Image (cartoon, rainbow, N blue to C red):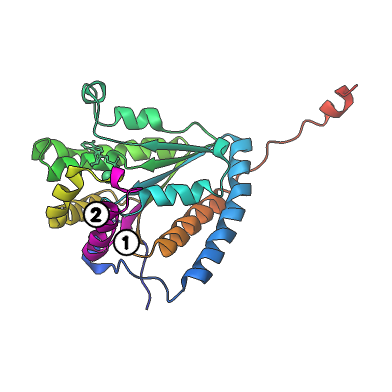
Amino acid sequence: MDQPLTVPPGRDVRLADFDPDFHEGLDREAADKETREHLDALDGLAYRLFAEAKRAVVVVLQGIDTSGKDGTIRMLASGISPQCLDVRSFKAPSALELAHDFLWRVHAAIPPHGRIGVFNRSHYEDVVVVRVRKLVPKDVWRDRYTQINAFEKLLHDGGLTFVKCFLHISKREQRQRLEDRLKDPKKQWKLGPDDLEDRKRWDDFQNAYDDALTECNTHHAPWHVVPSDKKWYRNLVVARLVRTTLERLDPKFPPFDSSLIMKLD
Ligand code: AMP
Ligand code: MG
C-alpha cells in the first residue's frame, strides 16, 4: 500500500482519505535506524545553514492534542545542535498578543537566517481552534486563509522555507493516549480540561483542518499529512522531510578569505 504525503495545491484535502496508521510496512527497528541516518545527515546540513546565514527554515507542527508535537520536537533536537534550532510554542494568546493582529506573534517568532525554527502549533490555530471554539466570528477567520497565504509568501520570498506537517492520528489512538495521560503521573500534567472538551468536537476539528489544509496548501508553502498513529513512523517521516528540504537548499559555507592566512603571526 502506498499513500501520498502531499496533495497538489488547488485540490481538496480530506483527512478521512489518509490512513493515520500507514507505515510503509516498516517495523520499528528499521524505521528508527533510518530516522537516525536522517538525523546524522541533518546535523551537518543544519550546521552549513547556520554558517551560510542567508536562509532559514520553519517546521510547523500542527495536530490535535496528543498527536505528537512534543515528541517530534524531542526527536529533531536529538539530532540537530541547539544553536541551529529555535523552538517556539504557541499557546492561547496573551492580552498583549490579542491587542495585535493574529500574525504579529508569529512574525516575531520567525527565526533569523541560518536557523531552523520549530513551531509547536502556529498561526493555523487562528483558523482551527478559534473556529471550533467560536472565539471569533466566521467572517474574521474566513479571511485569514488569504492573509496566511500572503504572509507565508512574503516570508518565502525573503528566504524562508516552510515545512508544514499535520500530525494525523485516529480518534481511537487519541483515546489511548489520553487514557495514558490520565493514568501516568508523569503525563497527567499535560492533560487540561480543554483536551477532553476538544475531543468531543473531534469532527469539527477534522473539518476545520480539512479546510485549513485545502485553503493554505500553496506551491510556496505546501502541507504534508504525516501518518502519526505510530510514533516511530511519524519521526521517520518528519526527519526525512526536513533532511530533503535542507538537501534541496544545499547551504554553502561562506567563501574563505585566504588573505587571513598571512595575518596569523
Ligand atoms: P498545549 O499545546 O497543550 O500546551 O496547549 C496550548 C493550547 O493553546 C491549545 O489548547 C491550543 O489550541 C491553544 N491555542 C494556541 N493558539 C491559540 C489561539 N491563537 N487561539 C486560541 N487558543 C490557542
Ligand atoms: Mg495539550
Q: Quadrant of residue 178?
A: bottom left
Q: In this view, does 18 lie to the left or right of 79?
A: left
The amino acid beneath tag 1 is Val
Quarter the C terminus occupies: top right
Q: In this view, does 42 lie above or below 254?
A: below
Most common SS among magenta residues: helix
Q: Name the residue: 32% across, 28% down.
A: 105
Q: Is mark 1 on a helix, strand or loop?
A: loop
Q: What stretch is highlighted in magenta?
A: 165-189
The amino acid beneath tag 2 is Thr
Residue beneath disc 2: 214
Residue beneath disc 1: 7
Q: Residue 13 location, x and y as percent?
A: 24, 60
Q: Name the residue: 21% across, 38% down.
A: 144
Q: In this view, does 27 lie to the left or right of 191?
A: right
Q: Tag count in the figure?
A: 2
- Circles 2 and 1 in contact, beta carbons < 8 Å: yes
Q: Which of 129 and 17 is in front in this view?
A: 129
| Ligand 1 occupies quarter | top left
Q: Is residue 184 magenta?
A: yes
Q: Is mark 2 on a helix, strand or loop?
A: helix
